[in-house]
Amino acid sequence: MVHGVPNPPAQTEQARQQARDKALMVRRMRAERKQQLKAGDLSLADLLAEADRDPLVAKMKVLTVVESLPAIGKVKARRTLADIGIDESRRLRGLGEHQRAALLENFA
């Protein structure tokens, strides 16, 4: 026990491997969505709709999603998010209705 916080239970090697496999699957799915955005095969509106249904998509950071859009670089993505008033660390699920509308208006 450190500072009054109990130690987490020890995991079996099998449980650790399952966690690694799940993390790898999630990273691949998110990378696939970003690639689809970059290629124009998936729209920002479609991704936002998917985020409403899928908690794994909802946990994607808005900044990385915007940077994945065609012809949008890191500087333009950060500048636009700042202009809209969206923090760089915000995730898709944390966007309000007005922020979503502003994103779609700027990047649709």
Image: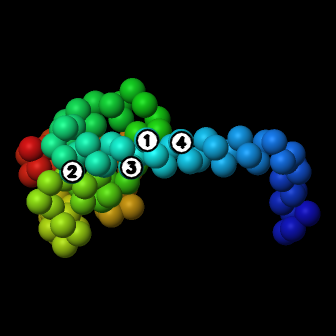
Name the residue carrying label 4: 25
**Disc on res. 31:** 3
First in sequence: mark 4 vs mark 2: 4
Quadrant of residue 54 in the image?
top left
Q: Are marks 2 and 1 in contact (CB under 8 Å)?
A: no
Name the residue carrying label 1: 29
Quadrant of residue 64 in the image?
bottom left
Q: Are marks 4 and 3 in contact (CB under 8 Å)?
A: no
Given the image, on which type of amino acid does mark 2 rest?
A: Lys
* Vertical arrangement, residue 84 with respect to residue 55, above or below: below
Given the image, on which type of amino acid does mark 3 rest?
A: Ala
Given the image, on which type of amino acid does mark 1 rest?
A: Met
Q: CA distance from mark 1 to mark 3?
A: 5 Å
SS under mark 4: helix
Q: Are marks 4 and 1 in contact (CB under 8 Å)?
A: yes
SS under mark 2: helix
- The x and y percentages for residue 53 are 39, 27
- The x and y percentages for residue 83 are 15, 64
- The x and y percentages for residue 9 are 87, 49
Quadrant including the C terminus = top left
First in sequence: mark 3 vs mark 2: 3
Residue drawn at (14%, 54%) of the image = 70
Q: CA distance from mark 4 to mark 1?
A: 6 Å
